[in-house]
Amino acid sequence: MIHIQIVLYDGFDLLDAIAPYEVFCAAAMNAENTLSVQFVTAEGARPVASGINGLTIEASGRLNPELAGIILVPGASGALEGEEPDSIPAILARAMNTELTGLIGRALHHEEIAVATVCGGSLLLAMGGLLEGRPAVTNRLGMDLLGAAGAVPVPARIVDDGNLVTGGGVTSGLDVALYLVERELGPRIAHAVEQLFEFERRGTVWREEGIAPGSSMIAPDKEPHNAGNEAAKPSGSLHESITQASAFAGEWDTILATPVGKLKVRLSISTSGGTIRGKAIQEDETVEFIDPELRDNKLIWSLRITKPMRLNLKFEVAVDGDHITGFAKAGLLPASKLTGKRVP
C-alpha cells in the first residue's frame, strides 16, 4: 500500500491540492486500491480554509513523517505582493512557522518517502531551509525567490530530484500527480488515468542525468566572496572613496519592516582605505556582509539569513548624518524598509 498524504494549511491553493487528490484517487480505482489518499495537516484533523474565498476542506488526520509513500505540499492562494495577512508570502511564512517544516524535514530523511510540491509548495519548503542546494521549480513568478531561499531554480514543468519532486505553476498538480503515478505504479495505470480525465501530462520531466547541453540551464551562480576576503572596492578617486565609505562606518541600530513583522538588526560597519566590511546581528545570529559595494553614495550588499526564514537578501542603504535608510529585497517578496540611527 502506497500512502498519499496531501498537506493542507490555512490559505492553501485549492487546485494545487484537489487536482492531485483526484488523480491519486483515480489511480487507486484502476490499481485495485493499492493507494490510499487523505488530507492531513501538521496539527491533526481539522477544517482548513483555502486562500481566496476561504472554502473549507476537512483534513482527516495529522501528517505522519514516518509513513511510507508520498507527501504532497500545495502552494498558497492570495495576493502576489503586499504586506497584508492574506498575501501569498504571508501565508507561506505562517505555514512555515508551524510544525510543518520540522515534519517535512523528517520525511525528507526517510528512505521510503517522496516529498512532492505543487507551485508555491516548494517555496514553503525552501523558506524553511529544506531545499538548500537542491534543484526545484515553482510558479514562474517565484523563481527568483526560490533561488534566494537557497534552492537551485530549474525552469521546467516538473523537476525530479529523487525523493523530492516539484511542479511549477498552479495547474502542474495534475502533471506532478500523473508523473508520480507513472513512477510508482507504471505507465499503464498513469495512461488509464489520463484517458479517464482526457488530459495528457505536459512538459519534460527534468532530472540531473544524461548528456548535458552546451550551457547548463541551472549552472549555479558563482559563489559570492565572503566579505572577510573581499570587501567593497568603490570606484572614483581614492579620497572620494574614503570620504564616502567613512559615512557608513560605525554601529547602527536598525528596524527592518518585513511582511512577517518588524525585526531589530544591529549593523556593524567598518572601513579601511576606502573599503568596507560589515556584519548584521539579529538576536543570536551574526552574518557577514557579502560583496559590499559603494554605488552612487549608497552601500549595497547581500546577506544570507536564516531568521525569520532562510533567504538571500540584497540590501541597499544610504546615510544622512546619523540616520540610515534603505531596503532589503528577495525575489517577489515585497521590499522590506530599513531605518535606523547611529549608536553613539
Image (cartoon, rainbow, N blue to C red):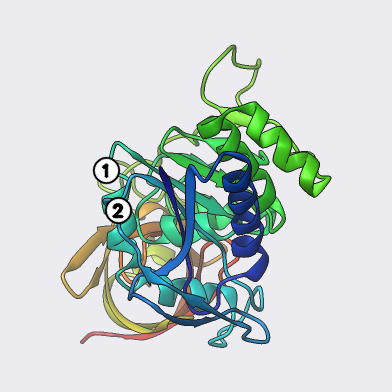
Amino acid type, residue under disc 2 in the picture: Gly
* Residue 150 x, y percent position in the rendering: 42, 49
- Name the image quarter holding residue 257: bottom left
Circle 2 crowding by C-alpha within 10 Å: few under 14, some 14–19, many from 20: some
* Residue 202 x, y percent position in the rendering: 76, 39
- Name the image quarter holding residue 335: bottom right
Circles 2 and 1, Cβ within 8 Å, touching? The answer is: yes
Residue farthest to the left?
A: 284
As drawn, the label of residue 105 is: 2
Q: Is residue 309 left or right of residue 234?
A: left
* Residue 65 x, y percent position in the rendering: 29, 55
Residue farthest to the top?
A: 211
Q: Is residue 43 left or right of residue 155?
A: left
Q: Is residue 232 visible?
A: yes
Q: Is residue 84 left or right of residue 259?
A: right
Residue for point 57% across, 39% down:
31
Amino acid type, residue under disc 1 in the picture: His
Q: Is residue 87 left or right of residue 1?
A: right
Residue nearer the viewer, 325 or 72: 72
Query: For the image shown, how many numbered marks are present on the structure?
Result: 2
* Residue 277 x, y percent position in the rendering: 29, 56
Residue for point 27% across, 43% down:
109
- C-alpha gap between disc 2 and disc 1: 7 Å
SS type, badge 2: helix
Residue nearer the viewer, 11 or 43: 43
As drawn, the label of residue 109 is: 1
Is 265 located above or below residue 20 in the figure?
below
SS type, badge 1: loop
Is 86 located above or below residue 288 in the figure?
below
Is 263 located above or below residue 69 in the figure?
below
Residue nearer the viewer, 51 or 230: 51
Quadrant occupied by the C terminus? bottom left
